[in-house]
């Protein structure tokens, strides 16, 4: 650090700071924990055959995702600007070219695209709060729950309405800014969500098919390994950790200089993984106990969880509370998807926060209708990977985020001089720096390149 004579960045951020290290961990976990853990992880794991996918996913999370998350925080804190300017500035400093700003720009675009579908799915969870309260899931059967789901996702008006409502809330929170909006929202919702997941776990452990659900998730069947499955696992690792597009970088810009990047990132990755695994352990036993299809896709949690709630005493209220918390978890993630583009507009075009948030929000809102329509009017309109939703999801999670991550890890591991990264990643921590460097320089880039080459059939 400074006493070693290694230059440390003395920039301060333009838009305030987290009130504490804990607030930062909360905010990044708030970004990481969301629909990716509870909605997406179970259905992607289900579609890709369970155990083998989970194993590859865990490797991707800890050996590729974790070091890249550290790198993103490191870059954010060093640049102290929006991700586009941060990458341009550090690129200039470390390698004499501001072209690295493109990484930030493509990340901001990925954020737009992700939020466009994210908001639609999150809208469904908001709809489910009201459905639960109205007794729609009393005495549920697989068929009745499926019908409720169909009436929401299948209707342009319903789905569009909830999408509008959710995105509107996101815009308001982003317009309010760092301290007031984001921190406050995350502080109470994360622990509450965790507790209710534990309650659900207790329920699914008692309902008979727990062992089958458990084995489905943890008994790898290696015949299920395929190049597309490995790509999906890598994509899911990026999606769930919120890395590869600059969201974590934007949050890192507000991190106090004395906070440990290694420890905070590790904490976030563990929390995120725990919640995803918990979600799987809750959902698969319910799937098997009710003869549902684990490969049924994006509707999976919406068609399984109400079955569990319906059989609990007071289930109506537990269900409403659960979907409320899930909507909150989605909200704290949605905020982080918008933040990079908004801060960029603020800094580059001098817009105020509310104006920038509204403009970005409007574009995302319009794009969202491609996803709304993918589950009804345009559900048969498929190309490349499927519907509009399938394509936007594939393009962002499986291509843009991993490519962004590759650029970030190459930049931190190979382009940036050692002194710069040492000075940010507390060198007192000793071996953790060495491990980070090994993962960043070799393991992560090689894994990413292999996954891409494999996916386009180079090894076939
Ligand atoms: N990680 C969030 C989730 O699992 C989604 C998310 C928030 C995200 N910010 C992101 C995904 C940035 C990719 C990039 O629900």
Image: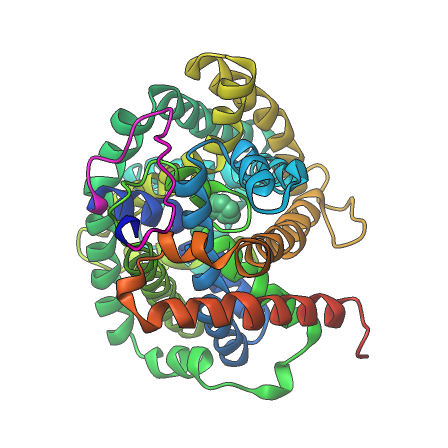
- Relative to 367, does residue 347 appear above or below in the rendering? above
Residue 117 percent across, percent down from the top left: 57, 40
Which residue is located at x 57 percent, y 72 percent?
442
Decide which of 232, 374 is in the foreground and name it: 232
Kindly identify the residue that appears in the image at 79 percent across and 79 percent down.
459
- Splitting the image into 4 quarters, where does residue 273 fall? bottom left
**Closer to the camera, 445 or 454?**
445
Q: Left or right of 350: which side holds 200?
A: left
- As displayed, is residue 450 above or below residue 123? below
- Left or right? Give the position of 370 relative to 123: right
The figure's colour scheme reads rainbow
**Residue 132 counted in the magenta span:** no
Direction from residue 453 to residue 172 in the image, left or right: left
Residue 290 visible? The answer is: no
From the top left corner, tell me how far across and down residue 269 is, in percent.
Answer: 36, 61
| Main SS, magenta residues | loop
Q: Residue at x 26, y 28 (%)?
A: 179
Please state the horizontal and vertical placement of residue 94, each as a whole percent of the image: 57, 46
Number of numbered labels in the structure image:
0
Q: Which residues are magenta?
A: 4-21
Q: Give the vertical position of 245 relative to 41 (above or below).
A: above
Q: Is residue 7 magenta?
A: yes
Q: Quadrant of the C terminus?
A: bottom right
The residue under the point 55% across, 87% down is 221
């Amino acid at each position: 650090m400074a006493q070693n004579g290694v230059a440390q960045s003395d920039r301060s951020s333009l838009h305030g700071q987290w009130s504490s290290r804990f607030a930062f961990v909360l905010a990044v976990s708030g970004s990481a924990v969301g629909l990716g853990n509870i909605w997406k992880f179970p259905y992607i794991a289900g579609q890709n055959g369970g155990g083998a996918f989970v194993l590859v996913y865990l490797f991707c999370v800890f050996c590729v995702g974790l070091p890249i998350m550290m790198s993103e925080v490191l870059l954010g804190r060093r640049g102290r600007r929006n991700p586009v300017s941060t990458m341009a500035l550090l690129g200039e400093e470390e390698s004499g070219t501001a072209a690295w700003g493109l990484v930030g720009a493509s990340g901001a675009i990925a954020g737009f695209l992700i939020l466009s579908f994210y908001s639609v799915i999150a809208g469904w969870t908001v709809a489910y709060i009201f459905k639960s309260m109205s007794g729609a899931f009393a005495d549920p059967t697989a068929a009745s729950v499926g019908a409720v789901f169909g009436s929401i996702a299948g209707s342009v008006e319903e789905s569009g309405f909830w999408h509008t409502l959710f995105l509107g809330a996101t815009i308001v929170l982003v317009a309010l800014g760092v301290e007031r909006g984001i921190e406050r929202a995350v502080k109470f919702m994360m622990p509450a969500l965790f507790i209710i997941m534990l309650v659900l776990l207790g329920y699914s452990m008692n309902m008979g098919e727990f062992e089958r659900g458990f084995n489905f998730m943890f008994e790898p069947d290696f015949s299920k390994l395929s190049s597309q499955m490995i790509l999906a696992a890598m994509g899911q690792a990026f999606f769930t950790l919120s890395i590869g597009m600059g969201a974590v970088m934007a949050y890192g810009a507000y991190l106090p200089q004395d906070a440990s990047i290694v420890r905070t990132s590790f904490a976030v990755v563990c929390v995120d993984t725990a919640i995803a695994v918990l979600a799987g352990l809750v959902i698969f036993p319910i799937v098997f106990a009710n003869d549902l299809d684990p490969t049924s896709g994006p509707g999976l949690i919406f068609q399984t969880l109400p079955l569990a709630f319906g059989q609990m005493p007071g289930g109506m209220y537990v269900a409403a509370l659960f979907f409320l918390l899930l909507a909150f978890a989605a909200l704290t993630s949605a905020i982080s998807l918008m933040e990079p583009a908004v801060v960029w507009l603020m800094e580059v075009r001098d817009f105020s926060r509310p104006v920038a948030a509204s403009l970005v929000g409007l574009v995302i809102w319009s794009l969202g209708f491609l996803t709304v329509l993918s589950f009804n009017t345009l559900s048969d309109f498929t190309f490349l990977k499927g519907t509009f939703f399938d394509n936007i999801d594939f393009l962002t999670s499986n291509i843009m985020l991993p490519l962004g991550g590759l650029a970030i890890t190459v930049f931190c591991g190979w382009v940036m001089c050692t002194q710069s990264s040492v000075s940010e990643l507390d060198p007192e921590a000793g071996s953790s720096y060495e491990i980070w460097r090994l993962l960043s320089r070799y393991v992560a880039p090689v894994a990413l390149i292999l996954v891409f080459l494999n996916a386009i059939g180079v090894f076939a």
